[in-house]
Image (cartoon, rainbow, N blue to C red):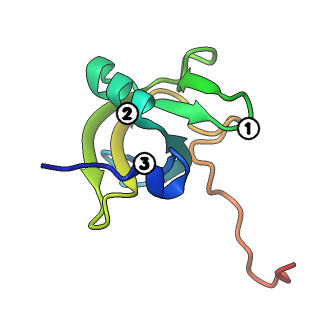
Amino acid sequence: MIKIDFEKQNGLVPCIVQEEGTKDVLMLAYMNEESLKKTMETGLATYWSRSRNELWIKGETSGHYQHVKQILVDCDEDTILLFVEQEGAACHTGRHSCFYRTMEGEEIE
């Protein structure tokens, strides 16, 4: 039986989101116990917004829903990996993925 350790990180665990077909990493979000349950019940990726302090269904306002195809948990049971079918853009900038910038030649501050 898998038991996600939500308490290890103050009730939240990181959730990596990958596109099922391309395997592109789309985004990183956070889940609490309630958002994981809602995701499992509805099949729509539901996260915890740290800035708004509330649940949010990805695509609820933009129409860019994430249909969950598989949920994996890491060996420490404190990180979730979602494989999704992405409608439209995953990034709030309108890009397919939130990971579109490189740091080649950049200084780390």
- Tag of residue 36: 2
Picture mark count: 3
User: 16 or 62, which lies in front?
Assistant: 16
Taking the spot 80% from the left edge, 85% from the top edge, the residue there is 105
Mark 1 and 2 residues: CB-CB less than 8 Å, in contact? Answer: no
Can residue 50 be seen?
yes
Q: Nearer the viewer, residue 73 or 87?
A: 73
Q: Amino acid at mark 2?
A: Leu
**Could you tell me which residue is drawn at 62 percent across and 18 percent down?**
62
Please state which amino acid type lies under the numbered disc 1: Thr
**Which mark's residue is nearer the viewer, 2 or 3?**
3
Distance Cα–Cα, label 2 vs label 3: 11 Å
In the picture of the structure, the residue carrying the numbered disc 1 is: 93
In what quadrant of the picture does the C terminus appear?
bottom right
Is residue 89 placed above or below 100 in the rendered structure?
above
Q: Secondary structure at mark 2?
A: helix
The reply to whether residue 16 is visible in this rendering is no
* Label 2 Cα neighbours within 10 Å, binned few <14 / some 14-19 / many ≥20: many
- Amino acid type of the residue tagged 3 in the rendering: Phe
Q: Looking at the image, is 106 positioned above or below residue 88?
A: below
Disc 1 and disc 3: Cα gap in Å? Answer: 29 Å
